[in-house]
Image (cartoon, rainbow, N blue to C red):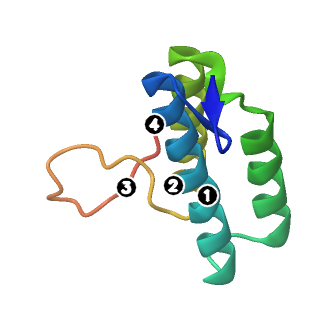
Amino acid sequence: MTTASVPADPEARAATEQLLGVKQGIRTARQAGKITQDQARDLMRQADAIKPTGGRSAIRQINDLDQRLRDATGQGTYMGDGSDGGYYPNG
């Protein structure tokens, strides 16, 4: 059962909220000039393909997409102790 397009299932609701956050991040990164229009379109297309009702699989897909957004904006996963000041995307 859903109410106002928000899933009643807590896991699906969390995935929906997380997906909305990633989509907002894509829009914000594009507006800030951190990613190109083509990158934004590709990332948004990937976001639109994720079905939040997919449970843990959907959350994993959303996390992967979020990581791709971070990589595209130069804010990939920080590896190491930070002493070298470098970001190295996982992958």
Q: Earlier in the sequence, mark 2 or mark 4?
A: 2
Q: Residue 5 lies in what quarter of the image? A: top right
Q: Residue 39 lies in what quarter of the image? A: bottom right
Crowdedness near tag 1: few (<14), some (14–19) or many (≥20) residues, C-alpha within 10 Å:
some
Relative to 42, residue 26 above or below: below
Q: Can see residue 6?
A: yes
The residue wearing badge 1 is: 72
Where residue 17 appears, as percent x and y from the top left, is 51, 45
| Local secondary structure at mark 3 | loop
Q: Which mark is residue 87?
A: 3
Horizontal side, residue 3 vs residue 46: left or right: left
Seen at 72% across and 43% down, the residue is: 47
Q: Which mark is residue 90?
A: 4
The residue wearing badge 2 is: 70
Crowdedness near tag 2: few (<14), some (14–19) or many (≥20) residues, C-alpha within 10 Å:
some
The reply to whether discs 2 and 3 touch (Cβ–Cβ < 8 Å) is no
| Local secondary structure at mark 4 | loop
